[in-house]
Image: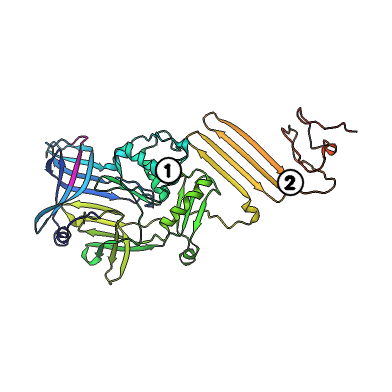
Amino acid sequence: MINVPDTIKEAYSKSTTQYDKIVINEEEYAINNVDLEDDCYEEGNIFGTAIAKALSFEIDSSVDLEGKEFKYYTGIKTSVGIEWIDLGTYITQEVEPNDTTKINTVNAMDYMLKTNIKYTSDLQYSNNNITLGQVAQEACMKAGIVLATTDFPNVSFIVDSNQFEDGTLIRQVISAIAQISGTVAKVKNDDKLYFVTPKTTGTVKKVFNLSDYSEAEIKRATYPINLVSLGMSDVEGENVVMRDEESITLYGENALVINDNPFAYTESKRQQLITAIFNAVKGFEYKAFELTGQGLPYLETLDNIQIIDFEGKTYYSFLFRVYHKSPKGLETEMSAPSITKATVNYQNIANAEQIAKRTEYIVNKQEQKITQIVENQSEFEESLTKVETDLEGIKQEVSNIATYKRAIEGTTEIHLTEAGATEILNLEIQGNKTYEANLFPGEDLYPSESLYPNQEVL
């Protein structure tokens, strides 16, 4: 919530008439028919979003706003005169002239727009000491905005390489950071970037009474998040999962699923990252709602609120979406859409044999390589297959290592079955007894240039 005096809060409880202006180069200009869209909900989710606020208004055509930055203020008449609320700096995107009325319609966005430029990095990842927080700092610096949040979940995670493909926008990097930290990226009215962790236990910023609004609807309650999954969308079995079993027993599985995050491109990294995300979002829940009525521009998206229904029942929720209209404040729409429940293939508790198996895809976008590792361990054998594909050169290398281990006494025989009529590049047998004299080619063992018996076969 923007810090405003109580006189402004009191005025909004009594009046529906607002005043609006912009300031550019220290000159003030009145504007009219203002629409301000502030949203943090996208494709059924809020976590990991980085959405710019969009501003539209009408202004006299004599004011040149092409490609300009300006401050936007909305005001209301109080006991001490008109008091103004600073709603931040905006950058003009489009000016639509009307030659008949001499009134232009201006479309603009907040400083999140600055992040819509190509991402490049000068960080020395090879030193193995670059943190997620440093990546966020550099991204904001290159976009020309200030990072306000320097402490967030996984901020100290070591980033060992730049996994963002050429052409990636800084906004996509910021979104990936928000995603892997269980936060929402927002530019607030001070023009700084924040990573916000919505907390159910946060301070309530406003109590909405449904009887005060022309249109109001309480919707379904979202159940608490009790499962987090990190994985790769196109690879089965790559998910790393944390679960709150007690909550799942009560409410069923309610998941936050994060797939294909560039910072979590190996199973090991997903294991390192998931705990902080799980702790940040576990138990997150709210009541979905829609309200239409007097707007309160000092409220911000992600503010904690309460809703009192017509029967006097109180619900806790958040402000996720605001369509603010001025000077007709009674047309402002405020809502918290329901988060869509995701469908995930969950990891079951593995038995002893399954624990010893590992299949991992490592996608290194920077080096354009995909590495697949398949490992299996049993009581007597360890096998490791590694397939490395170079995407640029369209070439593939395969290495296959099998280790057979067994304690034996006396004489034993080793049979290589289904070996195929191809060269065995390297066959190594180790033991604590002399075995050379007992090594013979068999019908499934094909000698090559580097494979010979150690003595003449009689």
Q: Residue furthest top?
A: 449
| Vertical placement of residue 185 versus 248, above or below | above
Q: Is residue 440 left or right of residue 420?
A: right
Task: Indicate yes or no whether the magenta region holds residue 69.
Answer: yes
Question: How are the residues colored?
Answer: rainbow
Which segment is the magenta one?
65-72
Residue 296, horizontal then vertical, whole percent: 21, 56
Q: Is residue 438 left or right of residue 36?
A: right
Which residue has dot 1 on it?
Answer: 131
Dot 2 falls on a residue whose secondary structure is loop
Q: Nearer the viewer, mark 1 or mark 2?
A: 1
Q: Earlier in the sequence, mark 1 or mark 2?
A: 1
Q: Is residue 314 left or right of residue 350?
A: left
Task: Indicate yes or no whether the magenta region holds residue 415.
Answer: no
What type is the residue that disc 2 sits on?
Lys
Q: Is residue 231 left or right of residue 418?
A: left
Q: Residue furthest right?
A: 458
Residue 120, horizontal then vertical, whole percent: 38, 34
Which residue has dot 2 on it?
Answer: 405
Mark 2 residue crowding within 10 angstroms, few (<14) / some (14–19) / many (20+): some
- How many marks can you see? 2
Residue 4, horizontal then vertical, whole percent: 19, 55
What type is the residue that disc 1 sits on?
Thr
Q: Quadrant of residue 210?
A: bottom left
Q: Residue furthest bottom?
A: 311
| Vertical placement of residue 332 versus 55, above or below | below
Q: Quadrant of the N terminus?
A: bottom left
Q: Can residue 180 be seen by looking at this rendering? A: yes
Q: Quadrant of the C terminus?
A: top right
Task: Depth check: give the residue in front, 285 or 409.
Answer: 409
Q: Can residue 256 be seen by looking at this rendering? A: no
Mark 1 residue crowding within 10 angstroms, few (<14) / some (14–19) / many (20+): some
